[in-house]
Amino acid sequence: MFSVLIVDDNPSLAAALDDILALKGFEIHVVPSGAAALQVLHDYPVDVLLTDIIMPEMDGVALYRHTRNTHPKLITILMTAYAADELIQQGMAEGIKTVLTKPIDIDFLILLLSTYKKRKSTGN
């Protein structure tokens, strides 16, 4: 199974992503905060961290920083509806590969996740 952890403090967006990605065959975990995400990562195997950038208490880049040493194979994708250029630049400089703008292009996200899933299954 290929698992995606969605971290977003917007419950309606998180639920919509959950529904769509689950229908596409991904195992989904949804949490509203960075602290809750760290707990899920401790308890379950996760392949992709799909996290909002701007959240209270812990932003998406800070969450990535917490995970990159403990989960070095975890793929992190940032999402944002705001101009967070400085945070985006920091995250990209530190190893984040993809930043998606909200509203999310669902077809692109599914293609991206499917590519990562295929790479994992072939060992690339």
Image (spheres, rainbow, N blue to C red):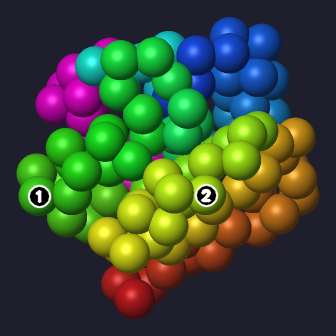
Q: Mark 2 points at which residue?
A: 85
From the viewer's perspective, tell me whether residue 115 is left or right of residue 65: right
Say which residue appears at 51% left-offset and 24% top-offset: 55
Quick check: is 42 in the magenta stretch?
Answer: yes
Q: Compared with residue 74, is residue 121 higher up or lower down, i.e. above or below?
A: below
Q: Is mark 1 on a helix, strand or loop?
A: loop
Q: Rounded to the nearest whole Å, what is the CA distance between mark 1 and mark 2?
A: 24 Å
- The quadrant of the image that shows the C terminus is bottom left
Q: Which residue is drawn at 36% across and 84% down?
A: 123
The foreground one among 29 and 54 is: 54
The answer, for residue 2, to whether it is visible in the render is no
Which residue shows up at 32% across the image and 49% down it?
64
For residue 86, above or below residue 59:
below
Kindly identify which residue carries mark 1: 69
Occupied quadrant, residue 72 = bottom left
Q: Residues within 10 Å of mark 2 (few under 14, many from 20)?
A: few
The answer to whether one can see residue 122 in this image is: yes
